[in-house]
Amino acid sequence: MQLLALALYHQDNRKPPRVLRFHPGRLNILTGESETGKSGVLAIIDFCLGRSKPGLPDNPIDRTVGWYALLAEFRDGRRMVLARPRPAGESTNEAFVRSGDQTLSLPSAAELHVNSNAAALRGEVSAHLGIEDFRFQPPASAARYPFDVSVAQGALFCFQNQDEIAASKTLFHRQTEDGIAQAIKDTLPYFLGAAGPEQALRQYRLGEARREVRTAQRKLDAALRQREVLDTNGIALLRLAQSEGLLSDVPAAPDADTVQALLRKALAVPPLAPISSDVGDRRQELNEERRTLRAQLQEFDAALATVDRWQRRSFDFTGELHLQVDRLKTLDLLGPERDHDTDVCPMCTQPLEHRDPSAQDISRLTIRLSEELEQAAGVQPVRQEHLRALQVQRDGLAERLKANGALLKELMASDENMARLQEQHLRAAHLQGRIAQSLAHDRRPTDDVGQLRNALASAQEVVSVLEEHTANDDVPAETERRLADIAAQMTPWARRLKLGQSEEPNEAGISFKKLSVVIRRPQDRLPQERVGSAKNYIGYHLVAHLALHTYLRHHHRPVPSFLALDQPTQAFFPSKPRDASTVPDADWSTVTEYFRLLHDVSELNQGDLQIIVCDHANLPDDWFQEAVIDNWRPDEDGTRNALIPPRWLA
């Protein structure tokens, strides 16, 4: 695939397109001053090949262009128009694709319309390039996604932007972006011819087979652990069954079959019937009787206390009466034989001025007290008898209450025994449930382990067969061998440009691991960044990509047959020169040698390699001027030439 033309269409479709035409199979030089859009040419070509983002700055290109179109021609003579509309945002997947023979040309602005998308565009270009239809499968252990190999990866070897060609540590286009370096490592062996879809498929199947082996090994290990756990649990269940009375005479070290048989025997023991008892009713009766007896006992205690109080008060009362009667007897006033004269003092027997009725009253009171004393003396035996009767009845209640307590104590002891027995029955039933669950989950690991061992052996056999098939598919070694062929061309070109560390016996090459240039010296390997100098970085980038594309062309590999370079002579001029051709003190002999190498390599490939260079330099040599496709410097009348025509900006 080589480029025939690049076209920019104005947004209003009324102005003619800006067309930049290329010569296939030759060196194409676009020279001009700074800020004329030369660097944008590479970004537009990359965008037309299917990128979702054009990567163009917000400048007149982005503000005036409505469509970008690329006319490409393939090795079989077929042509394709690859057009992309300017995205409304940062990116777009819309595309216009048209295929045809050698008469196909750029379409008019009116013909452009969205009829495809970026993925379909890449698919058609990949088919024309001869990229085989296969999906790259990363290793099973890799944490990245599979992808379809297409021109999207092949184009990474076709561009060198201004900042990439002078990079000290990287070599390829967009290598510093996320995932791009790994994509290059994944697809470079294919594009070099070191690996194809068959090898990739075999490697993928081998990875899958190894994953199957790991899976089968994990399952086998799990089954073995399960069997060990089941055996341990089974013996533990046997010991519990023996302790609960479900089994007897359990061997000290039973084997797996014996464990299973004994567990089934324990499971076959009939469930123990629940213990029925009227203990609860009897305990309730005794508690009711106990409450009644306690209530009656309290009543008798209250009655005894009342009688006792009465007895004590009677004793106190009669005692006081006896004391008073004894005092009156001492005065001899209470004799029943005397009738006291109320007109005479009973103490001195002298006549009283007034009659004293108290003596008579006292006499009558004494008589009444004596009568009450006699009555109290008669009641006392009856009270004593009532007190004894109450005490007897209370003692009977106390004996009955004591007997009730004894019965309750015996009943509680019997209840505890029955509870323990009931608990034992429950434990036995629970244990039988555990045994049933263990037997249900035990699918006899011996059979499973045997099947898993067979599955593991089968998976290992598949891996062995695939390893034999892939033994000759030593992709890394084959890739290094082909990179060595590329290095054989790099080294003389590096010496021709007199690059640092290029003298004999050193050899320049491409490091597949680091994706950069490496200098192989007898004592060690020197990475590109340690060579130093922007001149050397650019020089080694040039010889690496020229050697790579020469190898690809000679072996007819499905990579676009063009190499686009931006500012390969930037190391020889001041930063952003207005016009490098006006710089008098530049190393023009080295600049000339760089361009001469590009010219000679394009001639060496005999039309199979197209080189496009955007640069400030404008050498007077005939071979250089023949390669110039456009010169973006002001005309004699001062009209400024650039990618965007001045009339588009008016």
Image (spheres, helix red, strand yellow):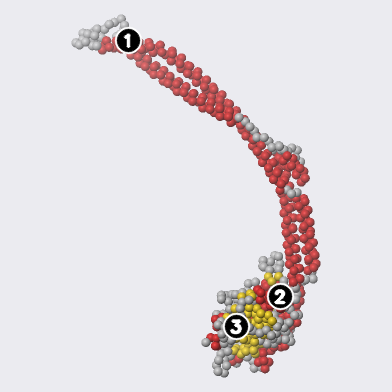
In front of the other: 139 or 501: 139
Q: If you read the primary sequence from the N terminus, does the residue marked by circle 2 or circle 3 appear first? A: 3
In front of the other: 86 or 176: 86
Which marked residue is nearer to the observer: mark 2 or mark 1? 2
**Residue 450 screen position, x and y as percent:** 78, 53
Q: If you read the primary sequence from the N terminus, does the residue marked by circle 3 or circle 1 appear first? A: 3
The quarter in which the N terminus is drawn is bottom right
Which marked residue is nearer to the observer: mark 3 or mark 1? 3
Q: Residue at x 60, y 91 (%)?
A: 581
The residue where tag 1 is placed is 367
Q: Amino acid at mark 3?
A: Ala
Q: Residue at x 67, y 90 (%)?
A: 627
The residue where tag 2 is placed is 188
* Residue 170 seen anywhere in this rendered image of the structure: no
**Residue 186 screen position, x and y as percent:** 70, 72
Left or right, residue 479 beside residue 60: right
Determine which of the numbered discs, if any, sits on residue 109 in the image: 3
